[in-house]
Amino acid sequence: MNELLISPTVSLYIGAFVQWGFLMAFLYSLAHSINKSNKEKVYLSLVMSVSYSFSIFTNMNTVTYLDFLCFDILTIIALTLLRRFLKRDVAYIYLLTGLTINSTLHLFMHYDIYVLDNVDYWWLWNFYLIVINLVDLTMVTILFFNKDFLGLVALKRYLFGSTKSIHKKVE
């Protein structure tokens, strides 16, 4: 992955920090939910921790943006399957949104570099670097606090709540 914007060493440190964050979120939610029946954050943080830990086994010199896209899609599928057992959706919405943003950016970078053969640095590459890291940190943060601090759940309820009221009026 010599085509990456940052060196493999720096990306290894950033990846290790994010992995550590997801592992700590899992351990925190596990300890916090010992005497509680609601284990949703434990399951979500376990899926994210396992997913991001797979990058330990990847060679940062040979991995591509398409590999990252596949990892994100597999994690989205795992979260979607887990969704059947979840009641609240704050962390789920944030994780699904974050992984979708990451997947989209990985796809754009793959298309830009491998399909279009672009080697000239442009604003998309900076945008990718900043947004990927911010989204990862947001996903770690939501597993600790489980609060709708960006308003994604309120936006979802507004958008899909209005369609439900339309369907009720039609019936």
Image (tube, rainbow, N blue to C red):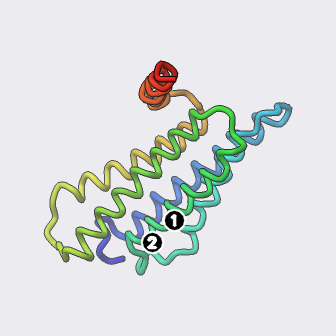
Position of residue 123 measured from the top left corner of the image (x, y, whole percent)? 17, 55
Mark 2 to mark 1 CA distance (whole Å): 6 Å
The one nearer the camera, 154 or 13, is 154
Q: Seen from this angle, which residue lies furthest bottom?
A: 62
Tell me the residue that label 2 is attached to.
67
Mark 2: amino acid: Asp
Q: Residue furthest front?
A: 171
Q: Position of residue 83 (x, y in %)?
A: 65, 45
Q: Residue at x 49, y 60 (%)?
A: 72
Q: Is residue 27 visible?
A: no
SS under mark 2:
helix
Q: Quadrant of the N terminus?
A: bottom left
Would you say the residues marked 2 and 1 are in contact, meaning their CB atoms lie under 8 Å apart?
yes
Residue drawn where x is 57% and y is 33% of the image: 90
Above or below, 67 relative to 92: below
Per the image, the residue denoted by label 1 is 71
Is any atom of residue 4 visible in this view? yes
Above/below status of 66 relative to 130: below
Q: Position of residue 61 (x, y in %)?
A: 41, 79
Q: Is residue 57 left or right of residue 42?
A: left
Q: Is residue 87 above or below residue 119?
A: above
